């Protein structure tokens, strides 16, 4: 969801207005992705590094998150979308944890697309936790395989990333799905997140469909 702040700054508005517009874009993308038949959609809303932002901005993002999670429910119901929180629940304010878990429970039986919202997500933390779980589960060194590790990630059971979209001209991966995106196709766009809507998603998916994926083969 990169570019919310710049989108607001371009209009001479406070950053929080950019985040609000960013949530509207998220709602649009949710619908467009589900209509396109995408099975898993992950949005990177808040990283383990985003706590470094000014306290007021963090508080406002958390408040927006709580407010909008509730507003997502009718769309999740009408489209049969299942919600999944991706990230460390510990470390999040209790109310946010409750809301994330509540939305997971309320949408658990939905048969359609899975919407993963990354909040307090960091790929390195996820990998460290998975490694710790291997130890806690008493695995012998040779039992620590790619499959064993993948089963202990927060994305256990979720297919690897096919298409990674980064908005606002950023050219980094920023600690996002490092393991899962090993063979992801990248789509980088100058478009700021609040302007990234259904037509832009369709354009990205069309570009992806033209790619030849070799997964290390020839
Ligand atoms: C990135 O833009 C955006 C964020 C760090 C926060 C986005 C999260 C929310 C708005 C919370 C609610 C989300 C949902 C989907 C319910 P930026 O601030 O880094 O923008 P900039 O790079 O232009 O400064």
Image (cartoon, rainbow, N blue to C red):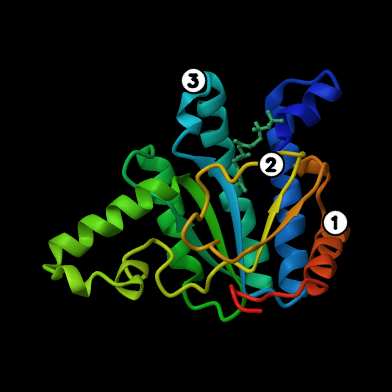
Would you name the residue on which mark 2 appears? 171
**Which residue is drawn at the image coordinates 72% and 42% (left, top)?**
22
- Please give the label number shown on residue 55: 3
- Please give the label number shown on residue 200: 1
| Quadrant placement of the C terminus | bottom right
**Which residue is drawn at the image coordinates 40% and 41% (left, top)?**
95
Query: Vertically, is 5 above or below 74?
Result: above
Q: Residues within 10 Å of mark 3 (few under 14, many from 20)?
A: few
Q: Where does the image place residue 33, in percent across and percent down from the top left?
A: 73, 67
In front of the other: label 2 or label 3?
2
Residue nearest the viewer, comparing 64 with 185: 185
Q: Going from the N terminus, do you reach mark 2 or mark 3 first?
A: 3
Query: Vertically, is 9 above or below 125?
Result: above
Inter-mark Cα distance, 2 to 3: 26 Å
Inter-mark Cα distance, 1 to 3: 32 Å
Q: What element carries label 3?
A: helix
Q: Where does the image place residue 108, in percent across and percent down from the top left?
A: 46, 72
């Amino acid at each position: 969801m990169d570019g919310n702040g710049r989108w607001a700054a371009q209009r001479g508005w406070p950053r929080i207005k950019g985040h609000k517009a960013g949530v509207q874009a998220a709602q649009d993308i949710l619908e467009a992705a589900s209509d396109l038949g995408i099975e898993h959609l992950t949005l990177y809303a808040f990283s383990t590094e985003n706590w470094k932002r000014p306290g007021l901005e963090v508080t406002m993002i958390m408040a927006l998150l709580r407010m909008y999670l509730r507003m997502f429910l009718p769309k999740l119901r009408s489209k049969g979308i299942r919600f999944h929180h991706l990230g460390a629940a510990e470390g999040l304010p209790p109310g946010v944890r409750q809301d994330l878990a509540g939305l997971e429970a309320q949408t658990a039986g939905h048969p359609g697309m899975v919407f993963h919202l990354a909040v307090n997500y960091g790929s390195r933390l996820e990998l460290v936790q998975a490694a710790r779980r291997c130890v806690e589960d008493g695995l012998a060194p040779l039992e620590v395989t790619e499959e064993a590790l993948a089963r202990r990630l927060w994305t256990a059971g979720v297919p690897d990333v096919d298409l990674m979209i980064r908005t606002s001209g950023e050219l980094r991966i920023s600690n996002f799905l490092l393991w899962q995106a090993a063979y992801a196709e990248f789509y980088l766009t100058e478009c700021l997140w609040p302007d990234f809507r259904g037509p832009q998603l369709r354009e990205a998916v069309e570009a992806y469909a033209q790619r030849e994926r070799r997964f290390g083969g020839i």
